[in-house]
Amino acid sequence: MKHSGFTLIEFLVYISLFSIVVLLVNQWVAMSLLPTQKSMKRMRSVSSLHAASEVLTRDVHAGSQEEQKWYIIEDQKIAWQINQSGICWEIRDNLLFRSEGSFNNGIFNKNSENLVGQNIDGSFLIKKKHGKIRAVECLLRDGNEQVTIIALPRLGVAV
């Protein structure tokens, strides 16, 4: 008697081989996508830091020496006044904020606050020479990425 078809053992061998091939292909796809996802996250982080640096540099460059008056200069916070409006940059709870408002007797009153970056650690450093601010240095870190911003106020600003 001649049987046509597969035996149960042959069927199990084929299923096992097919499963191994599917697992290998699945592993290969996962391994090729993982670096891409890390790279995308890193690029978002870098672009976020650079966007923050552009806005900070623009804020520091705004106004001339006579128009800027600096009020708050701390490690995690800087604030100054240009004409009648105040600008404040602050790193708080690993978030980078930019606030606009006004000063009343040296106290900053926020009108609006915008989140500029998340998962950011950093500090502000003011470089002075002869009682005038010559540079605002800001070091921003997002994980392994780091951006150092050096913004130069126009003509040096009196403190």
Image (tube, rainbow, N blue to C red):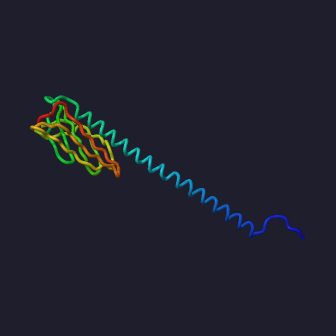
Labels in figure, total: 0
Q: Which residue is at the far front?
A: 129
Query: What residue do we see at 23% from left, 47% from top?
Result: 123
Q: Is residue 63 above or below residue 8?
A: above
Query: What residue do we see at 60% from left, 59% from top?
Result: 24
Whole-percent x and y of residue 149?
Answer: 27, 41
Q: Quadrant of residue 84?
A: top left
Whole-percent x and y of residue 37?
Answer: 47, 49
Q: Is residue 48 left or right of residue 98?
A: right
Which quadrant would the C terminus be assigned to in this image? Answer: top left
Query: What residue do we see at 40% from left, 44% from top?
Result: 44
Whole-percent x and y of residue 7?
Answer: 78, 68
Q: Quadrant of residue 131?
A: top left
Q: Is residue 129 left or right of residue 36?
A: left
Q: Is residue 134 above or below residue 24?
A: above
Which quadrant would the N terminus be assigned to in this image? Answer: bottom right
Q: Quadrant of residue 71?
A: top left
Near-viewer residue (87 or 28): 28
Whole-percent x and y of residue 5?
Answer: 81, 64
Q: Is residue 46 above or below residue 102?
A: below
